[in-house]
Image (cartoon, rainbow, N blue to C red):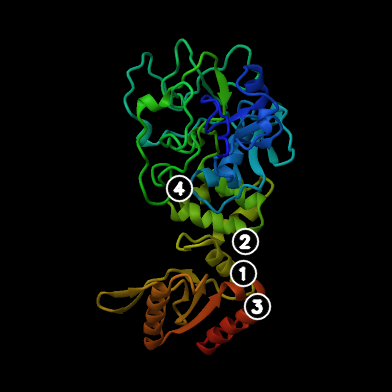
Amino acid sequence: MPRHPDRPSALAWQVFRASEAIRLGLVTAHKLRSSAWVNLRRDIYADSRLDLDHTLACRAASLQLPPGSALAGPSAALLYGVEHAAEFSDEVHVASPRTAGLRSQRGLRVHLTDLRPPAPPPAPAALLTPVPLPAPAPLSAHVPLSARSSLPAHGPATIGAAPSPAPGAVRTAPQPRGATRSTPPPRDAARAVGLRIGRGAAGGEGGAAVAVRPEDLTVAGATPIAVAAAAWALPRTDPATAAWETAVWLEPLRAVGIVDSLLRKGLTTRDALTAIGVRHADRPGGRRARWVFGLADPGAQSPPESELRVRLVLAGLPRPVARHPVRLAPGLVLHPGLAWPEFRVAVEYDGNPHADAEQLHRDRRRLNQLVCAGWIVLHAPGRRLRHDFPALTREVHAALAARGWRR
């Protein structure tokens, strides 16, 4: 039988600095080359059982952040629950004070700014379990590092036995001597132990956070070691600022999709975007951000649908309405993906028509009802969006022109 990878309990499901772990005798340089660990950045390793996604990349980058820095733009949007905002291979975006000395490097895009020191976001309600500890402190507070550690005090949490642990510090569960963990510990709000939170409590879609027992937030051992904080505790710019940064830093098609999702999830509002657009009107990229905000629509249900809408507008067609309600009969209201109500023309994006035969049947029936009510309904499969968009644009143009639209 293959031997189980050797992982000290203090490092299980964690992201940590290799130099710290080696100095404290928790692991050796040779063992770090085993399948138990994955190298994320220079001197930063993680338990290989963690999902290789952008949240993990953000946690690794957080170990390098000086005080006053914050994850920003698409990276912040990802942490707020916009899952398509960034992938594991994408650069982690960081806003950092000009005086902090942080510079861009491989996998890390640093944007120099005059940010005030960011406060960690509030903890999900599931972590607000009463814990009988003295001197209550905000749950987002981090345990101070040992005097020997060179890591920034605001970023990583510290695990290990400490004389007076701060309330709310994220810890790993204690392990019996010689035990091997075969299943992950209970979830905290955002993968401090490497799992996805139940979306909803931390700004994502649906679901509920899983409660964490106080006894699961402790660790055995005699020496503290700094590890990356849980995703919910990572410093980040607020949602409206993240939307502005995304609009300025990314190309428009991708930026609009992210801003659409921030609006749809209720993480920000049009009023907030208007306010930040006005506040930063004179900053580089201000006009671009306002243009992106003008294209955003909280009705969009997916990034490809956002892309389709924006590309049609850039092609010179009038702006469609996402999920416009069409009342066909008492009690029957349909919501086509994109619609021009005044011309009674609709376009439906078809992502994968073969994924669910029953869903396809319901969609076709719904669209037939629109056609019977006098609407022109066109289909935009993903393949045509990628490879045949000019012809698709001509078809939409012809349908609109047939109903009286003139450029």
Which residue is under mark 4?
267
Of the two numbered discs 3 and 1 in the rendering, the one whose residue sits closer to the viewer: 3
Circle 4 packing at 10 Å, graded few (<14), some (14-19), many (20+), is some
Are the residues flagged by discs 2 and 1 in contact, CB closer than 8 Å?
A: yes
Kindly identify the amino acid type of the residue bearing the numbered disc 2.
Answer: Leu
Q: Identify the secondary structure beneath mark 4.
A: loop
Closer to the chain start, of discs 2 and 3, is 2
Instruction: Mark 3 or mark 1: name the one nearer the start of the chain.
Output: 1
- Give how far apart the Cα atoms at labels 4 and 1 are: 25 Å
Q: Earlier in the sequence, mark 3 or mark 4?
A: 4
Tags 4 and 1 touching, CB below 8 Å: no
| Residue at numbered disc 1 | 311
Estimate the spatial distance between the alpha carbons at disc 3 and disc 1, rounded to whole Å.
12 Å
SS for tag 1? helix
* Residue for badge 3: 388
Q: Secondary structure at mark 2?
A: helix
Q: CA distance from mark 4 to mark 2?
A: 20 Å
Crowding near the residue tagged with mark 1, few <14, some 14–19, many ≥20 C-alpha atoms within 10 Å: some
Report the Cα–Cα distance between label 2 and label 1. 8 Å
Q: Which mark is residue 282?
A: none
Residue highlighted by disc 2: 253
Instruction: Tell me what residue is drawn at x 47 percent, y 51 percent.
Output: 271
Residue 154 seen in this snapshot: no
